[in-house]
Image (spheres, coloured by chain):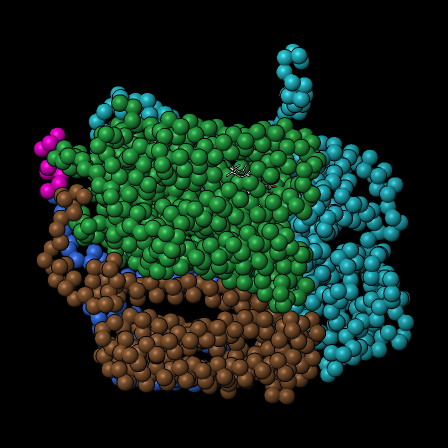
Amino acid sequence: MEQHQHEHHHHLPHLEIGPSEPTHTPLRIVSPKTYLIIGVILLCLTAATTAISYVELGVFNAVVAIAIAVLKASLVVLFFMHIKYSSKLMKLTVCSGLFTFLVLITLTMSDYVSRAWGRW
Amino acid sequence: MQHFISPVLWQFLVKWLTHFALFPPEASSIAPYADGLYFFLIFISLIGVGAVAFLVIFFSIRYRQSRHPVAVQIEGSTLLEATWTIIPLILFMIVFVWGALLYFRIYSPPPNAMNVYVVGKQWMWKVEHPGGQHEINALHIPINEPIQLTLISQDVFHSFSVPAFRVKREAIPGRYTTVWFEATRPGVYHLFCTQYCGTLHSQMIGWVYAMKPDDYQAWAAGSTSGHSLAQNGERLFASLGCNSCHNSTPNAHGPNLANVYGSHVQLANGQFTTVDDAFLRDTILNPTLHQVAGYAPIMPTYQGQVSEDGLIDLVEYIKGLNSNYRIDQTIDNSAGQPVQTGATPGGTSAPPLAPGTVKP
Amino acid sequence: MDSHTIAAQTAETAQLEHEHPSFLHHHFENLAQQREASTFGMWLFLLTEIMFFGGMFCAYLIFRNWYYSAFVAGSHTLHIWAGTLNTTVLIISSFTMAMAVHAAEVRHRVPLLRWMMVTILLGVGFLCIKGYEWHDEWVNHHVPGLNFSIEEFTHVNPAYPGDKPLAPDMAERTQIYYSLYFLMTGMHALHMIIGVSILTILLIKARGGAFTNGHIAPVENFGLYWHFVDIVWIFLFPLLYLISRHQ
Amino acid sequence: MSTSVSLPDQSTARLPKVSYLNKEYGLKSWLLTKDHKRIAIMYLLGTTFFFCIGGAMAALIRLQLLTPYGDLLAADTYNKVFSAHGLIMVFFFLVPVAPAVLGNFLIPLMIGARDVAFPRINLFSWYLFMTGGCIEVCMLVFGGVDTGWTFTTPLSTHFLNTQVVAAAMGIFVAGFSSILTGLNFIVTIHRMRAPGMTWFRLPLFIWSYYATSVIFVLATPVIAIALALVMLERVIGIGVFDPRMGGDPLLFQHLFWFYSHPAVYVMILPGMGIISEVVACFCRKRVFGYTAVAFSSVAIGVFSFFVWAHHMFIMGISNYSALVFSLMTMLVAVPSAIKIFNWSATMYKGSISFDTPMLYTLGFIGLFTIGGLTGVFLASLGMDIHLTETYFVVAHFHYVMVGGMVSALMAGLHFWWPKITGRMYPESLGRVAAIILFMGFNLTFFPQFILGYLGMPRRYWAYPPEFQALNVLSSAGATVLAIGYLLPICYFIWSLKYGKIAGSNPWQAAGLEWQVQSPPLTENFEQTPIVTHEAYDYEWLANQTRNEVPTVG
Ligand code: HEA
Ligand code: HEA
Ligand code: CUA
Ligand SMILES: [Cu+2]
């Protein structure tokens, strides 16, 4: 018994010293040039989305508007909010928020959309 | 015996023993199916609880500290864990499928069902039979005949529940819902409002009288108000001025309503829809929501001008409408004039309304 | 205490401990841990904000589906130039805020102050334009519950002569559009007001050099918040202003 | 030996000279404290206060239902009473109690941290909680609310003249307290773990609190916006929930249950964490299948977001949607089953002692299993038609919430009481109370299953006389239950002064929190611990104690 216990313990210690989260990343400073480029792209996209809304595209008007908004938001998140340079944990955090948001929207809409499928 | 225990307790015990019931009466064709599922659920619950209780009690006795002073360390067992993941999963899936089948059975009325309208309001149930019988907090039905209820609420959510039939359906403000059942045993059964609806929620109760067909006929004949719902609807149709557009004259501005019920119509947005109770009700209140293709959106809204009962009358009237003859008779020549179109309907949208006709 | 579990601190942690500036809270091991914790915390807070706005977006989607023409008509009464201008203002303010964070990172006090100033001004500018629009809507009787009137929607909108006037029942539904409009822009503006206030406080602190000594977490986290508010607007703009403008 | 308590020799044992309790004195030192342990104590006081209010309301409910005719209270008073009972029990007792009390106290200790990541925010969230609670109590004083805890629209928005706005406001404010607590825990668990405390060395308690915190952060904001909309609808009539204006009352329920279903797992996951600790300790074994139990917590947390519409099966959602939600509900039940069986299997070849926490734990396993399985009844679409809105649902959720979570909470409080106060509660009284609670509970709520199947609707002020017998049983049970709660409240208070001194590790448990003095120091650990062993490593612990003379203080 004694013996057994000892063995048991000698396998275990993979000592991680220091802050325990292995994913911490060193501070990375993004250059102002990047910010400027992203800012300009965002402004262009704003102009684009406004302009496109005057073109008749049918349902695609909404699709394009949302797509551009998503693109803009991603740029802000990735660059202005440094997610591109952040740890996996941060990326995962952002994704989980997005995911839950989508769950809320899609499952709720699934009810509203399918209500018309059959009237009881 | 009575002398040994307090009279109150005695009374209580007697009452309990004589009134003890585990199930409500099985009085509809659905009830045996619901009870079947219930027994299955109880059965698997007994297995589940039994298994857990057995393990816990057996281990408690076998491995209590005094008997088993040194614990044996065990990491786990993938095989065992998979077993007790998969077995409950399978059982739950069976329950899911079974429950879903039952659900669709309860909420899909057969086509030949007799329709009864139920309006819920704080705090009473108003039942309207097509023949014009009105009841408050009571529902008379014949047995052995499928009955479909079309429910709506005038104010908040209510829920129409008949435990003996194992059916229940929410009465929703602004929307028809339906449920059906077929009573199998004559009797008087509880009718509850089960959705909390304000102060007197618990008083929104009544009785369902399931009667032999003959008795039902006798009751129906004896308690009619003299006008069927459709007849009320016809009068309303004229007094609200619906007939000025919905007729078969050449200058009618609205769709011809004869035989429209149950038909497929194309909407302005290209989709098709079936004309049912809900569709009719919606179009009276929000005409442009389901704008029918080929007609201008000129129909005024009747929101706030027709009560739910009036709407039911109209729906019931249109349902049975298979000719425009009587409508065309009722319109005088001036009513055929075009209704104001396009430019300025805003100010003058109120339809002609004879006082006292909205509430039948 | 159990000396076997609780071994003495290793040389490495002790060394990190060495750098012990005033803003390192006692319960953190070192600055990196503190900074990561606060950024992570900020992100989690933003998740809650996503879900908070998520409820409103959900409502918006449902009613837009149901009452599309009312939403179109409502959208057409908004000033598209104001919306576009405001989007531009916000995006520029996001850029200036990013630059402020950068200034803090490289420990340049004066640029930090300048960028923060500009951001505040842009934020206030945004609110002014928004206020102007709200005032306009008030004048036009578009505020649900307070002075709403469907008058405008049952007539042809002069700016959109192609639009057909709405039938009265659909015109009533524009109120839902406006409720959501005020709700969403109102919540957004509330966030802007809070943001501007916090930024003002940060600015005052920054004057004393509080964030140019390596302690950038407050500025950085505020930046995240500010960008998030920007993102919300990036979605509000097309959803509220750009519905079927071509009609 | 019938107990594993190895109290230090009473003649020599003394409480430690310095601990978090006596480091500073005075009201101010408490009200401004940033110490997670003191904040936990303040939460304990707050939630106990609200439990007593909620319990008093329960007493009124059961008294009223003793007779079928509505003799005691007026109808609207009864409605206010059960609304207050539900609101307070859920939002001001069961949701906050386990995370904010035990979580706050134990998470830093268990992971080897000096405090939570944001102590100031922690204190702030206590104030938010108390502010919300005060609003709620004021609301009760100024007339109360009769919406039920579910605020169903359009009833709550257009048809009631009671204090709906105040009630919603109280919950709105308290909601932010939940959010901040959850946020704090997530960051703490990610960032503040001691060296060597890897994810799979964490006690299972931490895993389940982690899942709880995720729900707090992601779900609570949705009820905040739902309630904000209710308030706006009432105050200025924005129309989104008003069918007459084209709004949809069902939308409210979507938003409400999007929070409130995950919230019911907030009300059970911490309990599951507690049970894992207690089972391990009193069987002196590692929990059977650690990974499965850990991941099932996460799975419950994730799946809980997919099932909310099972509260709306007959409320007018699309039948196809109902199908999906029913299926997801079946799936979310599986991880709970895994846990139950894994705890049972933990007892296999253990060395089991039956101290109070373990008795509560056994009670939990039984009652939660019944409650959970009756949840499956409700998740089954066709069955739910008959059972929904009846006492069957009431029985279901009291079995999981009271039989499950409150039992687990009692287990946890007894288990960690020596750590929190440095003193033992009276063991034999504790066992008596546990047994009373179990019996009283079953007597109260089992008859309600039968009532429910018989069709007795919930939220009824008066009921048909044939339901009386079972209601009398239930009310009788509630009296027993009340004793089961009052007894611990009394002896816990008694033990503060007269309880035996516990020493640092009275249960000989392996968790990190037991390796420091009781009550702990303000900074928890004199030096940052370095963790070299797995969770529940009783062999390691045995080694430790063999080599050491136990010291107190
Ligand atoms: C702590 C709180 C809590 C918990 C944990 C649960 C857990 C579950 N609940 Fe419950 N529920 C509530 C609190 C809770 N619930 C409340 C408060 C309400 C009512 C709200 C209101 O309307 O006021 C409610 C209502 C409610 C409804 C709506 C009823 C209605 O209004 O019509 C449904 C329907 O699906 C449901 C289902 C479930 C299911 C499937 C689980 C599952 O997670 C349970 C899983 C557990 C098990 C299944 C037990 C363990 C299993 C075994 C040991 C395996 C057994 C073995 C074999 C079968 C072989 N619950
Ligand atoms: C955590 C949640 C929780 C807890 C612990 C309880 C605890 C209890 N609940 Fe409750 N209950 C709910 C949550 C909870 N409940 C919810 C959410 C509802 C739905 C509300 C709604 O429909 O909106 C509900 C509804 C509800 C009903 C249905 C009412 C109705 O539909 O008409 C009933 C009826 O029996 C009931 C009974 C009880 C009882 C007997 C207890 C017992 O366990 C309580 C025992 C405890 C005590 C008796 C307290 C001990 C005494 C004191 C601490 C001193 C008190 C002081 C004085 C008396 C002066 N509860
Ligand atoms: Cu109507 Cu309850
Ligand atoms: Cu649920």
Q: Quadrant of the C terminus of chain C?
A: bottom right
Q: Quadrant of the N terminus of chain C?
A: top left
Write the residue at 48% across / 75% down: C189
**Apparent side of residue D104 relative to residue B155 in the rendered image (left or right):** left
**Apparent side of residue B139 relative to residue D298 in the rendered image (left or right):** right
Residue D534 drawn at (x, y percent):
20, 43
Residue A38 drawn at (x, y percent):
32, 81
Give the vertical position of D480 relative to A28 (above or below).
above
- Chain D representation colour: green
- Chain C representation colour: brown
Write the residue at 74% across / 61% down: B260
Residue D419 drawn at (x, y percent):
30, 41
- Chain A representation colour: blue
**Apparent side of residue C207 relative to residue C58 in the rendered image (left or right):** left
- Residue range highlighted in magenta: A1-10
Write the residue at 25% across / 58% down: C27
